[in-house]
Image (cartoon, helix red, strand yellow):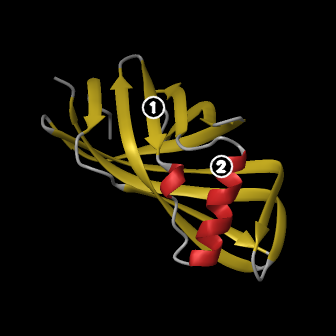
Amino acid sequence: MSFPAGTWILEQAQPVLTLTTEVKGRPFTLKAPIDSADVTVAQAVTLTLGVGIDHVSAGNFLLDAALRGFLVNYGAHELFFAGTGVLEADPVELGGVAKAGQVSVDLTLELREVSSSPLSLVIDITGTAVFKDVDIPIPGVGSLDQLSLAVQTQLELVPSQ
């Protein structure tokens, strides 16, 4: 598939970004709302995302409290990603930087077109982020010094007005 040219924006309220990780052999799935997203398709593809990480949920109140405490320590309320990739690739690999509070990490995301029409562009976004030298106490599990997150979401975007 080829991405339709133009600028596409998130109109639907708060789709969810799913982050999966493993902590001391136990899998965890984290969910956070996507507050904003836009894709610009021209000679390259540019993606910007805003993720409300201060509303992250693991479905476990102890883990949720630990994660929120960790994020507050780093001044992280919103995660912003901006990346650019070559249009001809399939999937499009977007190299960029994810920033949240005082933390910044290089991140490569893969972007795949699911479907498109003149009124809609549906995309899959996947990737992996690794945060080193962190200290996240998790009640009943221990402490993390490195966090690897698998990122996955599907967005339906509309043309920018």
Q: Position of residue 135 (x, y in %)?
A: 83, 57
Which quadrant is the N terminus positioned in?
top left
Quadrant housing residue 43: top left
Three-letter amino acid code at the position of disc 1? Thr
Q: Residues within 10 Å of mark 1 (few under 14, many from 20)?
A: some
> Against 39, is 116 above or below?
below
Where does residue 157 sit, x and y in percent of width and height?
26, 41
Amino acid type at image mark 2: Val
Crowding near the residue tagged with mark 2, few <14, some 14–19, many ≥20 C-alpha atoms within 10 Å: few
Above or below, 32 against 58 in this view is above
Residue that numbered label 1 is attached to: 48
Q: How many marks?
A: 2
Which image quadrant for residue 118?
top left
Q: Given the current orientation, which residue lies at the most extreme left position?
A: 119
Disc number at residue 101? none
Whole-percent x, y for residue 47 in the image: 44, 31
Q: Earlier in the sequence, mark 2 or mark 1?
A: 1
Q: How much space separates mark 2 and mark 1, taking CA atoms? A: 23 Å
Residue under the image location 54 percent in, 35 percent down: 81
Q: Residue at x 45, y 26 (%)?
A: 46
Residue, disc 2: 72
Which residue sits at x=83%, y=49%? 132
Q: Nearer the viewer, residue 92 or 74?
A: 74
Answer with left or right where residue 34 lies relative to residue 6.
right
| Outermost residue, top side | 43
* Residue at x 70%, y 55% (from the top left corner): 70
Which mark is nearer the camera, 2 or 1? Answer: 2
